[in-house]
Amino acid sequence: MSNAAVPATQDHGRSDGPLHVAIIMDGNGRWAAARGLTRAQGHRRGVEALRRVVRAAHELGIHYLTIFSFSSENWSRPASEIGDLFGLLRRFIRNDLATLHRDGVRVRVIGEREGLEPDICALLNEAEELTRNNTSLNLVVAFNYGSRQEIAHAARRLACEVAEGRRDQRLSNFLLWQAAYSELVFVPMHWPDFDKAALESAIVEYSRRERRFGGLAAKTAS
Ligand code: IPE
Ligand code: MG
């Protein structure tokens, strides 16, 4: 799909659609080139599509809409295009924030804020602050976002909390990626004390967990 990848990441077990939809907004440049327009014009049309999709998500009862707006890799684009994209973000927030707020949309922004121009940071904060108590659609804007960067940050923060003694349950940098959908059992003993009984009791605890892997609970799946 050239213009948007739409993985429905979770299902909340109702027949009326996914809980969370995440969209990579892609193909603005190709859309424009096919019409003899500039990339900037393509990006402007992209903002219109975003407005439509936010409205549609709201109407469809989607709870979370995450949109990939600017990736950490997009910095490799020409400065003029980056300027266009940032200009569009500024304008989007200035023009649309009041409407989003009126419609009960809660805006959250994920991604690296450090290094962004101060007025962009201020607008992102304003959008989050103004809408923080809204309860209809959660619009998650991934801006200056990269998944690897996110994992690295989360891991670093976790390591800091552990180092400061604010957190003592930890994965010790062990299989963080593979731990998705794993059941974690924290055993309150030091390794030298660990024995067969401890292993068995961990397995018993594991076996009591309901594992859904993003699917439905067994009793509701029939
Ligand atoms: C998406 O369109 C906009 C951003 C990545 C910000 P592109 O600019 O990637 O469009 P193509 O891929 O060149 O067509
Ligand atoms: Mg692209």
Image (cartoon, grey):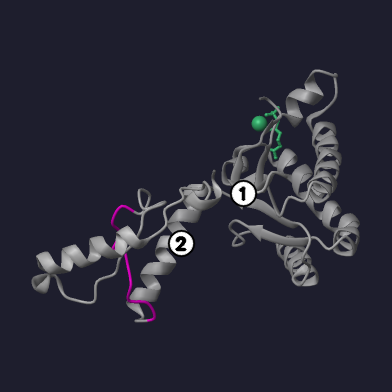
Say few, some or many: other residues with alpha carbon within 10 Å of mark 1 (under 14 / 14 to 19 / 20 or more): some
**Residue at image mark 1:** 13
Q: Which image quarter: residue 152? A: bottom left
Is 135 covered by the magenta stretch? no
In this view, the residue in front, 146 or 134, is 134
* Image point (80%, 71%), residue name: 130
In this view, the residue in front, 107 or 218, is 218
SS assignment for the magenta stretch, majority: loop
Measured Cα–Cα span from mark 2 to mark 1: 29 Å
Tag on residue 154? 2
List x then y, in percent, for residue 206.
31, 60
> Can residue 121 be seen in the rendering of this structure?
yes
* Image point (60%, 56%), residue name: 111
Mark toward the viewer: 2 or 1 = 1
List x then y, in percent, for residue 217.
50, 52
Seen in the picture, residue 110 relative to 168 is either above or below; the reply is above
Position of 187 with respect to 166 (left or right) is left
